[in-house]
Amino acid sequence: MMNFSLKRAQGATILLLAVTLSACQTTGVKNESGVQTTYQDSTKPGPATGIGIEGQDIIAMADAMMRDMMLSPQLANAAVPPRVIIDAKHFTNESAQRINKNLIADRLRVGLLRAARGRMQFVGREYADVVAKERELKRSGTVDVATTGRTQAQAGSDYRLVGRIASLDSRDTSTGMQQRFTQITFEMVDLESGILIWTNIYDFTKAAADSVTYR
C-alpha cells in the first residue's frame, strides 16, 4: 500500500515537472533577431555617418595625394628613382578625432607603389629590425644569402612623408548642429637637406545634428 502511494507521489512529481518545463518553454522570452550584416560601398558614406574622418574620406584623400605626387618631377620623373619612406611615424594627429594614422599612410604607400611602376622605390623603415636580424643570420652563415645578394648596409632614403591632421569644431547650441573643419597636410621632406620637395593639403567640412562616436 505504501509502495503504491510512493509510486503515485513520484508520478505526480514527474508530471508537475513536465508541465512546468512546458510552461517555461511556452511563456519564455524569445530573443529578437538583430540587424543583418550588410556590405557597404567603402567609397560612399555609410549608415553611420558623422562629422569626422571616415572611410570614404581616407580613400578619396589617398587617391588625390597619390595623383598629385605622381605629377611631381622630383618624385616620379627623376633620372634615378628616389627612395621614399611613407609611414605614419611622423604623421601627427592634432584633431579632435581619434584615428589610426596607418589607414592613411598605408593606403597612400600602396597606391603610390602600384602607380609608380619603378619610378619610385619605397623603404620599409618600420621593418628595420626584421631586416637587421635577417642580415645577421646571413653574415653568420646560419642561412645563405638568398637570391638578391648582399648590400653594404640597409637602404637609406631620400625623402620621407610627414604631415599633420588638424580640426576646428563649432556647435549651434540652439539647434544642436555640430560642424567640423578637418585639414590634413601632406609633405615630403628631403632627409639630407630638410627641404620640402612636395606638399599638399586635403580638407573638408561636415555638419550633423548628432555626432557619431569614432573608435
Image (spheres, grey):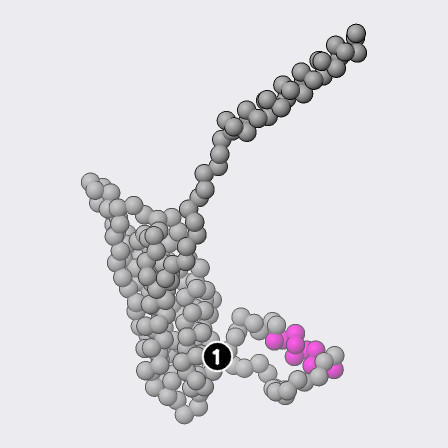
Q: Secondary structure at mark 1?
A: strand
The quadrant of the picture occupied by the N terminus is top right
What residue lies at 45% left-to-right and 38% top-to-bottom? 32
Q: Is residue 14 left or right of residue 195?
A: right
What residue lies at 53% left-to-right and 70% top-to-bottom? 126
Q: Position of residue 78 (x, y in %)?
A: 39, 89
Q: Position of residue 127 (x, y in %)?
A: 56, 72
Q: Is residue 59 left or right of residue 125?
A: left
What residue lies at 38% left-to-right and 83% top-to-bottom? 75
Q: Nearer the viewer, residue 100 or 167?
A: 100
Quadrant assignment, res 59: bottom left
Q: Nearer the viewer, residue 164 or 72?
A: 72
Question: Magenta stretch containing residue 138, yes or no?
Answer: yes
Give the residue type at disc 1.
Answer: Phe
Q: What residue did someone put label 1 on?
A: 122
Which span is picked out in magenta?
131-141
Question: Magenta stretch containing residue 121, yes or no?
Answer: no
Q: Main secondary structure of the magenta part?
A: helix
Q: Residues within 10 Å of mark 1 (few under 14, many from 20)?
A: many
Quadrant assignment, res 137: bottom right
Q: Position of residue 145 (x, y in %)?
A: 67, 85
What residue lies at 41% left-to-right and 82% top-to-bottom? 116
